[in-house]
Amino acid sequence: MLIVIDKGGNVAAGDAATKPELAKAVGRYKAHRAGSLLVLTLDEGTGAVAREGEVLALAGNVEASGLLSLMNLFGQNRETGRLVLKKGQVERVVLMHNGDVASIGSNVPSDRLGVFLVRMGQLTESDLEEAQREAERTGKRIGQALLQKGLIDAHELWSAIQEQITELFADVMQWVEGSFVLYRLAPGFAFPTTPPLQMTGLLLEAVRRADEMSVYRVRIPSVNTRLRRTNKEVGRILDDAELKQAGAAFKVLVKECSLADVAKILHVAEFDATRACYDLLKRGLVEIVKAQPNVPALKLKKEDEARIEVFNLAFREINDEILRSGQQERFGLGVRKFLSDEGHTFHALFRSVVPDATGALPIETLASNLGVLAAEGHNASDVIGEALNELTFFMLFQCGEVLDPHADEHLGRRVRLIHASLR
């Protein structure tokens, strides 16, 4: 984009391509000068603008920077400042002190400390309402109001704050898009009285949870996934101390309910409830409640239709190369076996899917299968990306077996160029 500022201070689009882009960013902005740089931050009920006395130190794109690397750098450099992370309408504000995390704020109501304490079973709704009235009357923080009214002990509050920071930090570290702004704090800034949490420990926990959750999500796609007990004999799971949480989840699942219900009843985080239910699934003690076969086809988002079409473009390119090689029968047999393999992770998406004469997959059949998967709690966009990506890798693997090395190398390069548009 090209923006022109004249001597009168007037701002205008510098070329035809800039005007429609500016039209997508309507709003009131604050400008920050950093030498020859001019940075604009949206100033409409957001924490992304500088507070009085703060100075802009760093800003950028989450996708280009990578939050894990960025936070690791801040920890190593012993950074002190206010980091604002924004993805769509969601904001997280990380307050850092000498490279450690002093607090994390959020504009999402369900992330607030009081709501978190209710979810964890340490407060009732009426307790929270009482504390909120006290906080509004006195101008104190919700934690201070809770302590003053004796609704929670100091050590319980401290433990809850630690767990809340850990949970919010682990969640935001999974963001792969959005923006960030780091501000140097105003002189004399008052940090929270609670000791900060070590950045290294938070990063390690975030990575551990992400790795584990990627395994769990293969079987339990979301908090909306519904589960129920099977008829398998329970054994010792209810008495095993190491499986305490799984045993508690099993008791909750005396009747069919969602993963979100399990977390709410046990007063645990989504991660802990997912791990407990995954343990039960592995042991065959519970099962996923499958959607009814008459679920309507999913109405695909435009961006998901576009993603499928990009993959289909790559599949057509592969098909054309296979036709030129005369290996279509052998190649087609391998693809059909892959799509019909019931032991495959993405079998539910590929059920009854048969490539057409050009090698493309029928969008209507995919949408029909996605309707069932969405009803079971799967995220359609994630399934499309992961499943079609794996199918592409399988096809290219087969190409390596049937094409000569020169043709295989050039085909791989063309497919990578096509996939580049997915970004």
Image (cartoon, rainbow, N blue to C red):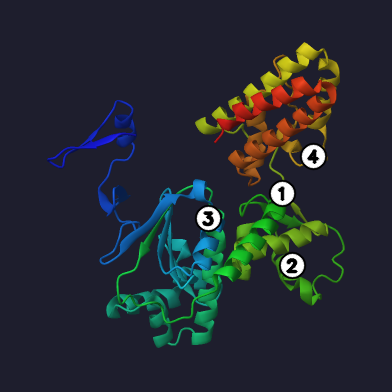
Circle nearer the N terminus (3, 2): 3
Report the side of 229 relative to 266 (left or right).
right
Q: Nearer the viewer, mark 1 or mark 3?
A: 3
Residue at image coords 83%, 60%: 283
Between 202 and 342, the residue placed more toward the observer is 202
Residue under pointer 2:
246
The answer to which quarter of the image holds residue 133 is bottom left
Label 1: few (<14), some (14–19) or many (≥20) C-alpha neighbours in 10 Å: few
Indicate the secondary structure of the residue bearing disc 4. Answer: loop
Q: Marks 2/4: CA distance?
A: 27 Å
Q: Is residue 96 left or right of residue 264?
A: left
How far apart are labels 3 and 4 at the CA level?
A: 32 Å
**Could you classify mark 3 by the number of other residues whose Cα lies within 10 Å: few (under 14), some (14-19), or many (20 or more)?**
many
- The amino acid sitting under disc 1 is Val
Spatial separation of the CA atoms under disc 4 and disc 1 = 11 Å
Q: Is residue 293 left or right of residue 338?
A: left
For label 2, the SS is helix
**Label 3 sits on residue:** 67
Q: Residue 218 carries which label?
A: 1
Q: Position of residue 64 (x, y in %)?
A: 50, 46
Question: Is residue 345 visible in the rendered structure shown here?
Answer: yes
Whole-angstrom CA distance, mark 1 to mark 2, is 18 Å
Earlier residue among tags 4 and 1: 1
Which mark is nearer the camera, 2 or 4? Answer: 4
